[in-house]
Amino acid sequence: MDYTALGKRIRDERLMQRLTLEKLAERTDKSINFIGQIERGEGKPSLETLVDIANALGVTVDSLLSDNIKASDNSIDKEVSVLLHNMSENGKRFILDTVKRYLYYHGEER
């Protein structure tokens, strides 16, 4: 288990949602120090704590563990498909433009 990657993913999600460490600790009923240790990869959360953190962030446990799960390309395709399906037309256009720019600048085939 890569606890550093797990902690980084938790921290990134928390920051993306503009939550403070204190707010996440409050939502999970854990100490600020413990949440900080988890985010730094120093603390090893139990499954129960991991579920509490995922629920507090409104994400799935598997999304937090994605660096530790050997997912097939098919599962990634499915996840992208579901996300795009629920997106507005403007959002889809934005994503399409972003992907095209990524492919252009990184020299990848279309």
Image (cartoon, rainbow, N blue to C red):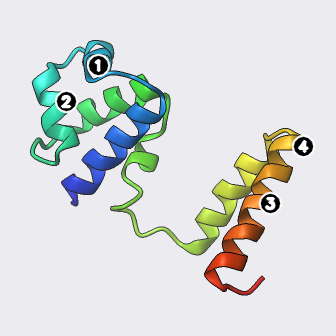
- Which residue in the protein does label 2 denote? 35
Q: Amino acid at mark 1?
A: Thr
Q: Secondary structure at mark 4?
A: helix
Task: Tell me if label 4 and label 3 are in contact, CB under 8 Å.
Answer: no
Q: CA distance from mark 3 to mark 2?
A: 37 Å
Farthest residue, direction right: 89
Residue for point 47% across, 35% down: 16
Q: Where 68 sits versus 85, above or below?
A: below
- Which residue in the protein does label 4 denote? 89
Residue for point 66% across, 77% down: 105
Tag shown at residue 96: none
- Residue 109 horizontal/vertical position (percent): 73, 87
Residue for point 68% across, 57% down: 80
Q: Amino acid at mark 2?
A: Ile
Q: Residues within 10 Å of mark 3 (few under 14, many from 20)?
A: few
The mark lying in front, picked from 1 and 4, is 4
Q: Secondary structure at mark 3?
A: helix
Please report whichever mark, 3 or 2, sits nearer to the chain's N-terminal start.
Answer: 2
Residue for point 49% across, 35% down: 59
Name the one closer to the observer, 22 or 57: 22
| Side of 3 where 77 appears, left or right | right
Please report whichever mark, 1 or 4, sits nearer to the chain's N-terminal start.
Answer: 1
Task: Tell me if label 3 and label 1 are in contact, CB under 8 Å.
Answer: no
- Which residue in the protein does label 1 denote? 28
Please report whichever mark, 1 or 2, sits nearer to the chain's N-terminal start.
Answer: 1
The mark lying in front, picked from 4 and 3, is 3
